[in-house]
Amino acid sequence: MKPGKIVCVGRNYAAHAAELGNEIPKFPLVFLKPASSVIGDGENIVYPDFSEEMHHEVELVLRIGKTIKNGSLEEAEAVIDAYTVGLDMTLRDIQSKLKEKGHPWTIAKCFDTSAVIGEFVSAQQYKPNFDEKISLKINGEIRQEAPLSLMLFKPAEIVKYISEKMTLEEGDYIMTGTPAGVGKVEKGDILEAEVENIAKLKVTVV
Ligand code: ZN
């Protein structure tokens, strides 16, 4: 199934908001990635020639199984039909310049190969308790690691909130934000991302 829109949540872990000098949000901060930015497990992240600072952000990804608009918390929970691990690759140098000027982050977030999405596990197959560990290794070394319980906004709350602002459709993905420990990647790096009991993926930066 080809993805629809990809809605991303920023600053959903307090320690990550702090490491970039941002306040803890009172409601989910959302932005979009296009379907054209998606790659899967085993593919390559292509370093864009217009950036010198690409960062990794490992995230829990939700898939929407049924259209929802202005959903209740129960309805929001029910439309999440699958989970996986993903990487929200970010051009931090470009994002910082855009933030300074108050401009949208689009160019920093929407480049080709910037959304790495693992294999989905259906919600019937595995029901997360959101205490699973999320982690990212670069060349075998742990860079990000946290329990999903540190998320400020939980998956159902995120879906409910987004559905109040725009219709979520079958096949849309939601990237739920990254824990602390983001940093630069270099060409040649091997990135291994995992959400415990849910999914793993491995990609190379070229
Ligand atoms: Zn992110």
Image: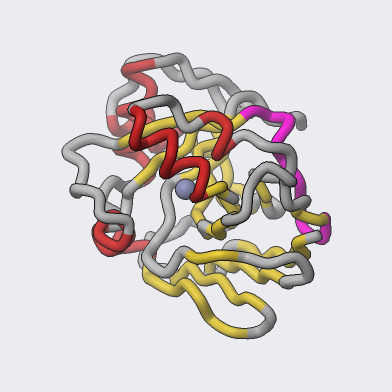
The stretch of residues the image draws in magenta is 34-43
Residue pictured at 39% horizontal, 62% vertical: 179
Total numbered labels: 0
* Residue 168 % position (x, y): 49, 21
Q: Is residue 10 visible?
A: yes
Q: Is residue 124 visible?
A: no
Dividing the image into 4 quarters, which one contains the C terminus?
bottom right
Question: 196 above or below 23?
Answer: below
User: In the depicted view, which residue is nearer to us: 20 or 12?
Assistant: 20
Q: Residue furthest bottom?
A: 141
Task: Tell whether 34 sits left or right of 135.
Answer: right
Task: Tell whether 60 sits left or right of 103.
Answer: right
User: In the depicted view, which residue is nearer to us: 152 or 144?
Assistant: 144
Residue pictured at 43% horizontal, 46% vertical: 176
- Say which quarter of the image contains residue 205: bottom right
* Residue 74 % position (x, y): 32, 33
Residue pictured at 68% horizontal, 67% vertical: 186
Query: Coloured how?
Result: secondary structure
* Residue 130 % position (x, y): 38, 60
* Residue 57 % position (x, y): 51, 57
- Say which quarter of the image contains residue 5: top right
Question: 168 above or below 13?
Answer: above
Dividing the image into 4 quarters, which one contains the N terminus?
top right
User: In the depicted view, which residue is nearer to us: 98 or 60?
Assistant: 98
Q: Is residue 36 magenta?
A: yes
User: In the depicted view, which residue is nearer to us: 57 or 125?
Assistant: 57
